[in-house]
Image: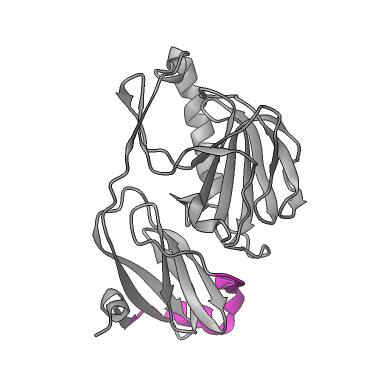
Amino acid sequence: MSKKASLIFRFRYLTSAVLCLFAAFSPSLFGADAVLQRLPAALLVPGGAAVVPTASDAIRGEYKGERVLLARFEGEQYAIIGIPLSAKPGLQTFTLDNRAGETETLGFSIADKAYTEQRLTIKNQRQVNPNETDMTRIQAESAEMKAAFRSWDEALAPTFSMIPPVDGVRSSSFGLKRFFNGEPRAPHSGMDIAADEGTPIVAPAAGRILATGNYFFNGNTIILDHGHGLISLYCHMNTIDVEVGRQVIAGEQIGRVGQTGRVTGPHLHWSVNLNNTRIDPALFLAD
């Protein structure tokens, strides 16, 4: 058996007759596949992405309770799945529904990855240990962003070939184990690109501005929806140059580099979310 075959298994079982009826008479209920010009780089580790070939009649997928992006590339259908940093090495499974009302379970195996540490000194102690008032704000902002990350817009055509959002130097990579003033915090969920304050920030791919705001940790922030659960985030900006609902194209300016929120200097924090999971943005940069 080939290595690919050994990583992917499948079995089918019938779901309820209700699902079958909905699939037969309301195919639009489950949406349409995206059509891609390029597949993302597969990286089967926590924080990476799985690219799994599927049966051509799949209409909806789920992984860890989140909807999966189904896409066609060169006539074949694929499930493209973001793998959370918290995922354990070994077998991962997800499900696919088809128009016949059947559910198929597929699997892929992931390896472990040892991310390095990063230790930062933050001068503003409230940015490390927020007070009660700060926590109320942080919790409200977190709920707002979580809702945005679960957006699913089938009118937008996602792309996995992106351009760098700013001209600068990568100062922090994805997945770093972070310590602020010696205290452990959540792993780094994006890529930091250092640049002079005021440097233009552009959309790395076409999309719709889903949300903007000033957040306690993230500072001035934009959330950009690329469609089908592919969403990107831009933080610590000096200015926000777009409004919610605006359609942007790749390379269009959306703001400027700043140092708002929890920072040690001017830079852009850029993250990419797929099936409500933060994964390494480097996977999306065009060769």
User: In the rendering, at what x and y percent does residue 121 appear?
Assistant: 41, 19
- In the shown orientation, is residue 91 left or right of residue 188? left
Residue in view at x 33 percent, y 74 percent? 106
- In the shown orientation, is residue 5 left or right of residue 188? left
Q: Residue 209 or 251: which is nearer the viewer?
A: 251
Q: Is 12 drawn above or below residue 84 in the view shown?
A: below
Residue in view at x 24 percent, y 85 percent? 1
The quadrant holding residue 230 is: bottom right
Scheme of colours in the image: one colour
- In the shown orientation, is residue 284 left or right of residue 131? right
Magenta stretch: includes residue 35:
yes
Residue in view at x 32 percent, y 44 percent? 115
User: Can see residue 96?
Assistant: yes
User: In the rendering, at what x and y percent does residue 105 appear?
Assistant: 33, 75
Q: Is 122 drawn above or below residue 18 in the view shown?
A: above
Magenta stretch: includes residue 49:
no
Q: Residue 160 or 67: which is nearer the viewer?
A: 160
The quadrant holding residue 88 is: bottom left
Residue in view at x 64 percent, y 42 percent? 166
Q: Is 158 drawn above or below residue 22 in the view shown?
A: above
The range drawn in magenta is 13-38
